[in-house]
Image (spheres, rainbow, N blue to C red):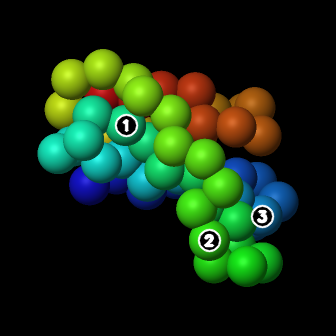
Amino acid sequence: MGIAVTQDGKKVYVTNSETSDVSVLDTATNTVITTVPVGRTPTHIARGNDPQPTLII
C-alpha cells in the first residue's frame, strides 16, 4: 500500500492494489471523498512539487 499526503495536509491518497484504484481521504472528516481507478495493482504513490500526487506505480 502506498500513501501520500498533500502539502497542506488536507488530503491523503492511498493506493488499493486489490481494487486497482486510489482512495482520496479528507483529513478533516476522516472520510473517503472519492476513489479513482488507476489501472492494475497500484502499490506506490509519490508527491512531487505539485500539491497533488503525481506518480502512481
Residue drawn 26% across the image and 54% down it:
1
Graded by Cα atoms within 10 Å as few (under 14), some (14 to 19) or many (20 or more), the crowding at tag 3 reads few
Give the spatial CA distance, label 1 vs label 2.
16 Å
Mark 3: amino acid: Lys
The earlier-in-sequence mark between 1 and 3 is 3
The earlier-in-sequence mark between 1 and 2 is 1
Graded by Cα atoms within 10 Å as few (under 14), some (14 to 19) or many (20 or more), the crowding at tag 2 reads few
- Position of the C terminus, as image quadrant, is top left
Q: Are marks 1 and 3 in contact (CB under 8 Å)?
A: no
- Where residue 24 appears, x then y in whole percent? 58, 52
Tell me if I can see residue 20 in this picture. yes
Tell me if I can see residue 46 in this picture. no
As drawn, 3 above or below 41: below
Disc 1 element: strand
Graded by Cα atoms within 10 Å as few (under 14), some (14 to 19) or many (20 or more), the crowding at tag 1 reads many
Q: Which residue is mark 2?
A: 31
Q: Count the marks: how many? A: 3
Q: Which residue is mark 3?
A: 10
Disc 3 element: loop
As drawn, 12 above or below 18: below
Q: Are marks 1 and 2 in contact (CB under 8 Å)?
A: no
Q: Quadrant of residue 52?
A: top right
Give the spatial CA distance, label 1 vs label 3.
20 Å
- Where residue 35 appears, x then y in whole percent? 51, 43
Mark 1: amino acid: Asp
In the picture, the disc for residue 21 is 1
- Where residue 3 appears, x then y in whole percent? 43, 56
Q: Quadrant of residue 50?
A: top right
Give the spatial CA distance, label 2 vs label 3.
11 Å
